[in-house]
Amino acid sequence: MQIVMKNINKSFGGIQVLHNAGLAIADSEIHALVGENGAGKSTLMKILTGVYTRDSGQILVNGEEVEYTHPKQAEAQGIVFIYQELNVMFDLTVEENMFLGKEIKKQFGILDKNAMKSEAKKVLDRLGVEIPVDCPMSELSVGQQQMVEIAKALMVDAKVIIMDEPTAALTPKETEVLFKVMRSLKEKGVSIVYISHRMEEIFELCDRITVLRDGEFIGSKDIGDTDMNDLVKMMIGRDIGERFPKRNCTQGEVVMSVKNFTKNGVFNNVSFSVKAGEVLGVAGLMGAGRTEIMQSIFGNLPYDSGSLEIMGKPVHIHSPEQAKKLGIGFITEDRKTEGLMLEETIKKNVALTNLSSISKNGVLDKDKENNLVDKAIKELSIHCFGPSHICSNLSGGNQQKVVFAKWIYINPKVLILDEPTRGVDIGAKKEIYTIINKLAESGVAIIMVSSELPEVLGMSDRVMVVHEGRVGGFLDSGEIKNIVPQKQATQENVMILATGGTL
């Protein structure tokens, strides 16, 4: 199927989000659609699939002009959108999810369960994945749920599948399986539109690439005719410089020390320390226990044994409020449900965490509040209409900056960052890296959990690798000298330790 979108315009409430945007999809290709958060990628695809109607412009499918006003119309023509937030009914089985609204029935409207199970198994076998069709969706990994969504697309004989950040929550192994499936679909004549911020994946997987910037079509290129620097310049309109900015920072004394931290069945005998001005990267496969360790330090998850010291003094943390008072901040991996009150303003989100510094005797000082929020917007370059901007209307990168603003003005001694750039475009990533470096240079001890290996290696002084709830080892970035020499931090060495190997 060939699709051409030309001069697409779309406004919401007087704000134009697409201006002469476009995209051309050829038969049997994997086509990357990239741009910063807010560039209009998802909006353009929602117009193609009938979620939104265009204000003007043209959509041609196999040379004929079309206008879908409902996703079912696009689906009937073989165009399917798999959203980042998967459309999954967790209480139903795989087979029930696959046939929801498309049930096979016998006489008198009785469901033909055997036929549906057989057909579901046939489609999953076509994908080359082994997922029991009678298994509840709640028991599947995110990667397996993703495969079920692809299987649903194949059931309607999809000719074009749009995938929005499909690897955001996948393990490396699940990502590998997904890529294999995508290449297989391409060989069978299916085209895939691949929306992602992960540059390495785009260059590994895709045939062509289209760039949107500020709602406008910037250009399309064969993947072999461009490189990462060229692509970034097209996306943000300028050279980004070094991907991971250098820090000019001298490490100080140990700020926090964790000894033999144990949560039975989750993590065991975890020990590490972090110094003032140090960025300690934490790597490992999904499910290794990285987040749980950090949640336990922050008081969100009770630990069974072990000890914790802040500035050499033993402390016992039983709640996030205690952690905060002791100078520990925590930026969660899920900003939409845990990091922000999305339907509230920037002002309210930032003020809530900083009430102790902007109020006296329980009375809010409005001037201090306004000054703090204005300072946050300016210092963190939050692109918004002002303090009253509702957070749900911000791009992902700017939402993440608001999360940072909540925590950095409590003047933390230790700041834990769990996937600090998840779902953030490359331009915003650079800005977040700069914020992290400034915090480290001011003496904050940073612990950064990340599933993106280039990020861990590019930003960390040391890397702690976690495997199945245990510390597999520590790796040296090569930028610092340790009393006890450690193995060099490379992607290969990280993966060896993350999978239970030894160096």
Image (cartoon, rainbow, N blue to C red):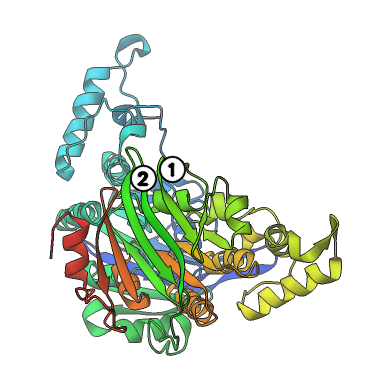
Report how many numbered discs are placed on residues in the image. Answer: 2
In the rendered image, residue 234, in percent from the top left (x then y), is placed at 41, 83
Q: Which residue is disc 1 drawn over?
A: 303
Q: Nearer the viewer, residue 217 or 312?
A: 312
In the rendered image, residue 312, in percent from the top left (x then y), is placed at 49, 64
Q: Is residue 302 left or right of residue 344?
A: left
**Local SS, label 1:** loop
Q: Residue at x 41, y 27 (%)?
A: 91
Q: Residue at x 75, y 65 (%)?
A: 357
For badge 1, the amino acid type reads Tyr
Q: Is residue 487 left or right of residue 12?
A: left
Q: In the rendered view of the protein, which quadrant contains the N terminus?
A: bottom left
**Local SS, label 2:** strand
Q: Which residue is disc 2 drawn over?
A: 262
- 391, above or below 262, in the image: below
For badge 2, the amino acid type reads Thr
- 442, above or below 331, in the image: below
Residue 140 shows up from this direction:
yes
Q: In the rendered view of the protein, which quadrant contains the C terminus?
A: bottom left
Please tell me which of labels 1 and 2 falls first in the chain. Answer: 2
Q: Quadrant location of residue 350?
A: bottom right
Callout 2 environment at 10 Å: few (<14), some (14 to 19), or many (20+)? many
Evaluate if marks 1 and 2 touch, with contact meaning CB atoms under 8 Å apart: yes
